[in-house]
Amino acid sequence: MSDNSPTTPSAPAPEEVEAAMAAHADDELARLQGELAELKAKSAELADQFLRAKAEAENARRRAEDEVAKARKFGIESFAESLLPVADSLDAALAIKEATPQQLREGADATLRQLTSTLERNKVLAINPAAGTKFDPHQHQAISVVPAEQEANTVVAVLQKGYVIAERVLRPALVTVSASK
């Protein structure tokens, strides 16, 4: 037989295929190892950022707690400071050994005005309903119900003033209320 048949390209030898696959695998391995190294570096960077952010959040929380504690501790400071002149007035009144009843009365009135002014500056307002005012259970506490010549459920008399601070009742006014007819 003659070799006139067309030559078929010869298939690569198995060693060549193995070498090519090994080279390709080595390239792929190197590429993947590079990616892995990049991802590890990125992961470490993100972990570091996370820890820093967590520490910063913890520090901010602690600072906020400290500020709240200080606000609670010193929040009343300005109110207490505004009461000092009232205390000074009372001390001065007690220091007078031979005061007349008239002087004591005038001093007590002046000190009461001073105290009332201080309370008002600090948003502490008196609840002192006039007779005939409709009874308000949110601001008044009925001590007794009495027959009266006025509309039912209205204030007849105030036994003790109440007080509010910033629209919140500190103490309700103690009142007597008219009975229904």
Image (cartoon, grey):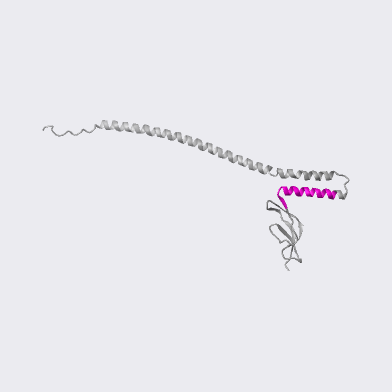
The quadrant where residue 76 appears: top right
In percent of width and height, residue 103 lies at 86, 48
125 left or right, relative to 98: left
Query: Which residue sits at x=73%, y=43%?
Result: 81
How many numbered badges does the structure rendering display?
0
Q: Nearer the viewer, residue 16 or 174?
A: 174
88 left or right, relative to 53: right
In percent of width and height, residue 172 lies at 72, 56
Q: Nearer the viewer, residue 107 or 23?
A: 107
36 left or right, relative to 145: left
Q: Residue furthest bottom?
A: 181
Q: Quadrant of the C terminus?
A: bottom right
The quadrant where residue 136 appears: bottom right
In percent of width and height, residue 74 lies at 69, 42
In percent of width and height, residue 23 lies at 32, 31
Q: Nearer the viewer, residue 58 or 146?
A: 146
User: Is 114 colored magenta in this rendering?
Assistant: yes
Prevailing secondary structure of the magenta residues: helix
User: Is 6 colored magenta in this rendering?
Assistant: no
Query: Which residue sits at x=45%, y=35%?
Result: 42
140 left or right, relative to 8: right
Image: magenta residue range: 104-125
Query: Which residue sits at x=74%, y=44%?
Result: 82
